[in-house]
Structure formats: structure tokens, C-alpha cells
Amino acid sequence: MSEIKHLNQVELSRRMDISCRTLERWRWIGAGPKFIKVGGRVKYRLADVEAYEQSRLCQSTADIHYAPSARVVLP
């Protein structure tokens, strides 16, 4: 049986090049990759992280996941 790989918050923030605070906010609002709590610590299963990354793939800036909050609506 293969071992399940887990990432902690710091490891994931480095992998995604985002702050730990962003990960904390995502958990609070229910965004980002799925996570588990183990003994009071937050862990991310590598498989869940990879699934989240796959779900965010874009082919153009018109894709729904491409920075929706940064879109400018022109008249």
C-alpha cells in the first residue's frame, strides 16, 4: 500500500507561491483545496492539492477560473 503524502500550510504556500494568510482565508470562506485537521494541525493531501490545481487550469483569459475578481467590465 502506498503512503499518502500530506503538505502543511507552509509547504503548500511555497508550492502555490501564495501567503499562508491566503490559505487561512480560503479555509475560512470554503475556497481552495480540501484540507484535514490532524491533532489541531491543518494538512493538505497531495492528491487533493493536485485535484484543485487541475480544476483551475485555464486555456485563455476568458476562462471562468482566470482571475474573476480582476476582470474589468467595459461599457
Image: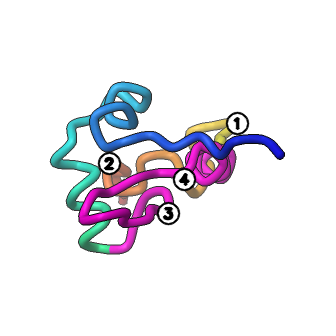
The reply to whether dot 1 and dot 4 touch (C-beta < 8 Å) is no
Q: Residue furthest right?
A: 1
Q: Amino acid at mark 1?
A: Gln
Q: Amino acid at mark 3?
A: Lys
| Residue holding disc 3 | 34
In depth, the one of 49 and 1 nearer the eye is 1
The reply to whether dot 1 and dot 2 touch (C-beta < 8 Å) is no
Q: Give the foreground label among 2 and 4.
A: 4
Q: Bin the neighbour count of mark 4 within 10 Å (Cα to Cα): few under 14, some 14-19, many 20 and up.
A: some
Q: Residue at x 30, y 61 (%)?
A: 26
Q: How many marks?
A: 4
> In the image, is residue 55 above or below residue 6?
below
- Residue 27 position, x and y percent, is 31, 66
In depth, the one of 65 and 33 nearer the eye is 33
Q: Amino acid at mark 2?
A: Ala
Q: Which mark is residue 59?
A: 1
Q: Residue 36 colored magenta?
A: yes
Q: Which mark is residue 65?
A: 4
Q: Secondary structure at mark 1?
A: loop
Q: Give the foreground label among 3 and 1.
A: 3
Question: Where the C terminus falls, by quadrant?
Answer: bottom left
Q: Residue 12 colored magenta?
A: no
* Magenta residue span: 30-56
In depth, the one of 40 and 25 nearer the eye is 40
